[in-house]
Amino acid sequence: MKRVKIIFLVSLVSLLTLGFLLLYIRNIINVHAVKTNSTISLASLAEKNDLKIGSEFDPNYAFHQSLNFDNTYTAILLHEFNLIVPGNNFKMKLIHPEQSRYDFTVTDMIVDFALEHHMDIHGHTLIWGNPKSLPKWLQDNSWKIPGRPDRDVLIDILKNHIKTIVGRYKGKVKAWDVVNEAFCDPANHAHKWSVPCIVIDGKKGGMDASVWRTVIGPEYIEIALQAAHEADPDAYLYINDNNYESINSPKSDKIYSFVKDLIERKVPINGVGQQMHIPLDAVDFSQYDRVISLIQQNFRKFNDLGLDMIITELDVRIKKSLFGPSDTQLKNQAKVFASMLKICMDSKCPSFTVWGFTDKYSWIPGHKKGYDYATPFDDKLRPKPAYYSLQEILKIKE
Ligand code: G3I
């Protein structure tokens, strides 16, 4: 009996060792595949199309000095993309942690890194009402000055914040999300991020009840754009938002009339950003052509105002499974990535950015329960069908 047990254990250990060995060899082959397949990089194809192809970027993995430095991540980032978008470092909470103190340590490193590697930087984001991006001092009312109207004080804070940052990186950061997620999604009206939306003229689809909107009023957006323009007249200025991909949806209509009014009053604005965080299971593939046409028409409508419409945060998340994504899911995901890139390339859309290029470091599993696999490279940094679909679209226009 004892002998049988020993034989069983030895066989089990051998099988496991063989399994691990095979997995290891497969990974080596795949890493090799990353290098060989990517000789025609997305960036080199994009350059020919006059397009900036970007990725959200986390400096934790990209700087040699960092404990988390990831050589393969950095190599792919530098090879495949010509634009980086720091996911968090420009947010007020990190760059302006105390009212009288800015912290440029990381953003300076990012800007130097990008310039050294001849990449553009899209600054995300100067003003965002979400408490997650606000420093404590702005949330606990310690900024108020007794005897001065709160509105005046907050306008000064907003202007100084923008002028300090945009001024510091003048000529280096070429484009900014000046204001992020200022508008409300009527479908998500009650509580978007724990603060209720404001109803304008009794209608849903107004603006978020952020400290900026509540204390200053909707004018905070034009004050922000104006301040950014004064600090760097050559910078491209965007307002960035989510869930308004389709033409004539209530949120798209709201943003359209808002920016149209800005243009008519000659407020400096170059365009609007479409975030596009898309759950694959929400895409209606039975009416795919119609869905795509509605998005295309929305791009055209904003373009007709003379504005860029850029894609700023694309990812396509898939329901998590023990066995990973199925081939069909990956194929459908690739189709969505390709369609969005095609729409961008057929429009006045100078940049196309994915919100992280690899599942290894994606924000999705940590923030969207039950979802994963949202980016064009898997968690081992191997290209997925979505990567090749982007390559194909870029080649059509080569
Ligand atoms: O760095 C700290 C770490 O020190 C700490 O231990 C840890 C504990 O929670 O938090 C870490 O910070 C987190 C940070 O991401 C970096 O990972 C913050 O808690 C977390 O709130 C932050 O989430 C970011 C989120 O915006 C809120 O700012 C996501 O990474 C980022 O991908 C996400 O990006 C937003 C865009 O800015 C706007 N559009 C939507 C998009 C997705 O939500």
Image (tube, helix red, strand yellow):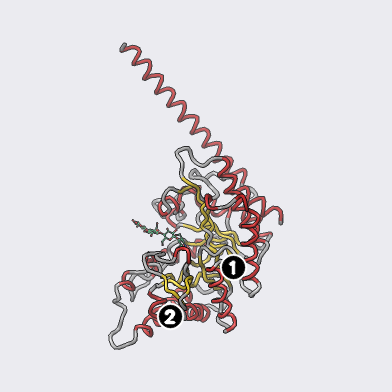
Residue 379 visible? The answer is: yes
Considering only order in the chain, which callout, 2 or 1, is on the residue closer to the N terminus?
A: 2
Where 315 sits versus 218, above or below?
Answer: above
* Residue drawn 51% across the image and 42% down it: 325
Return the residue nearer the eye: 387 or 255.
Answer: 255
* Residue drawn 59% across the image and 82% down it: 264
Return the residue nearer the eye: 167 or 245.
Answer: 245
Where 223 sits versus 348, above or below?
Answer: below
Q: Is residue 369 left or right of residue 45?
A: left
Q: Give residue 106's position: percent from left, percent from top.
A: 42, 63
* Residue drawn 38% across the image and 74% down it: 211
Residue for badge 1:
248
Return the residue nearer the eye: 368 or 112.
Answer: 368
Image quadrant in which you'd find residue 188: bottom left
User: Is label 1 in a helix, a strand or a loop?
Assistant: loop
User: Is label 2 in a helix, a strand or a loop?
Assistant: loop
Q: Is residue 23 left or right of residue 1?
A: right
Residue for badge 2:
217
Q: Please state the total of marks drawn on the protein image.
A: 2
Q: Give the amino acid type for the residue marked by disc 2 in the picture.
A: Gly
Of tags 1 and 2, the one toward the viewer is: 1
